[in-house]
Image (cartoon, rainbow, N blue to C red):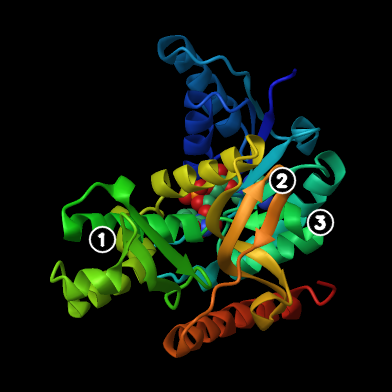
Amino acid sequence: MARNKIALIGSGMIGGTLAHLIGLKELGDVVLFDIAEGTPQGKALDIAQSSPVEGFDAKLKGVNEYAGIEGADVCIVTAGVPRKPGMSRDDLLGINLRVMEQVGAGIKKYAPNAFVICITNPLDAMVWALQKFSGLAPEKVVGMAGVLDSARFRLFLAEEFGVSVEDVSAMTLGGHGDDMVPLIRYSTVAGIPLPDLVKMGWTTQEKLDAIVERTRKGGGEIVGLLKTGSAYYAPAASAVAMAESYLKDKKRVLPCAAHLSGQYGLNDTYVGVPVVIGAGGVEKIVEIAFNKDEQAMFEKSVQAVSGLTDACLKIVPAL
Ligand code: TXD
């Protein structure tokens, strides 16, 4: 059986890290695509040269034409521009929407059967636009944000409790913006819900609220430190977990920006919700019951997302 083919559309900081992780995990052959001449080719060759040391077998190729992604099983999209200090994710919309139009056309023509994972910001609007531009079935186009935001939440919780990150599970839903919804009630340490840990004296509500706030601002914290761009190791690891669940039919339950067609009372909207990812792509949307506060936060976050998609419609009314 031929190896999987994974196309990375955008070969910048996240794209290169994706290629490296995919090689190390031997998930398949990799095609790096970019409009920058040389970048995809150079990164492909460099990572390929690490393969004898690491012991993984994978073909890595860099291309500047979409024909190079022909027949890809998975496309991971990071093409576009990242934030600089002082910029919000929303500031990227005008430029990155046009990029999604090009990427959608390329996928439509050369990889119509792929599972597409969008990373480009502002994520919830870009994945919504990418699905429309590409014309792929909504269950085959998903956005990566919740796995990253939940990973940040899990790390901060593990540090607070002094426990292994492996035993902290957390759920962050809603849009990938400052009003994302880290769900304290649905986050646990070894199955013990966070509210119980407060009652058991392991932490306080104030400390949890501070962790929620730090999670919300997690992207900006790194942009402020790096100054030249945004996070890329954790975003890449998060997208690889989603790709692996598709390629190996693992049926993982992960928070992703998924297409809603009535779930959570929403239609024609992409927003972060728990989904099951298997060989069919997004195989199930998990509808959890919010309490009043959670519902209000979710609705506020959805409002922010629809503001972004409205902005997209002003630029490309045909969307
Ligand atoms: O959780 C999330 N979804 C976010 C997403 C986490 C972190 C970063 N987030 C966003 O991912 C970020 O705001 C950007 O929109 C993307 C990619 O971030 P990255 O750090 O990888 O940006 P780079 O290093 O600038 O890489 C972008 C590449 C670069 O090599 C450009 O030449 C290329 O995109 N690019 C294009 N490729 C194809 N087609 C077009 N039109 C194009 N324009 C730029």
Q: Is residue 247 above or below residue 221?
A: above
Q: Position of residue 200 (x, y in %)?
A: 16, 70
User: Could you give the CA–CA distance between mark 2 and mark 1, rounded to whole angstroms?
Assistant: 32 Å
Task: Label 1: state its secondary structure.
Answer: helix
In the displayed image of the protein, which residue is found farthest to the top?
52
Q: Earlier in the sequence, mark 2 or mark 1?
A: 2
Residue 53, horizontal then vertical, whole percent: 41, 11
Q: In the rendered image of this protein, does residue 89 appear above or below residue 28?
A: below
Which numbered marker is on residue 137? 3
Label 3 Cα crowd, 10 Å radius (few <14 / some 14-19 / many 20+): some
Q: Please give the name of the residue rendered at 48% of the width and 89% of the height, measured from the top-left corner.
A: 296
Helix, strand or loop under label 3: loop
Judging by the rendered image, the residue that carries numbered circle 2 is: 115
From this viewpoint, is residue 117 visible?
Answer: yes
Circle 2: residue type: Phe
Q: What residue lies at 76% left-to-right and 31% top-to-bottom? A: 68
Instruction: State if disc 3 and disc 1 touch (CB < 8 Å).
Output: no
Would you call the spot at circle 1 few (<14 residues within 10 Å), some (14-19), or many (20 or more)?
A: many
Quarter occupied by the N terminus: top right
Q: Nearer the viewer, residue 49 or 215?
A: 215
Query: Which mark's residue is nearer the viewer, 2 or 1?
Result: 1
Left or right, 154 with respect to 266, comes to left
For label 1, the residue is 157
Asked if disc 2 and disc 1 are in contact, CB closer than 8 Å, the reply is no
- Marks 1 and 3 sit apart, C-alpha to C-alpha, by 36 Å
* Percent x, y of residue 248: 63, 34
Depth check, mark 1 against mark 3: the one in front is 1
Amino acid type assigned to the residue bearing label 3 in the image = Ala
- Residue at 42% of width from left, 88% of height from top? 293
Q: Quadrant of residue 276?
A: bottom right
Check residue 92 in the rendering and tell me which mark sits there, or answer none: none
For label 2, the SS is strand
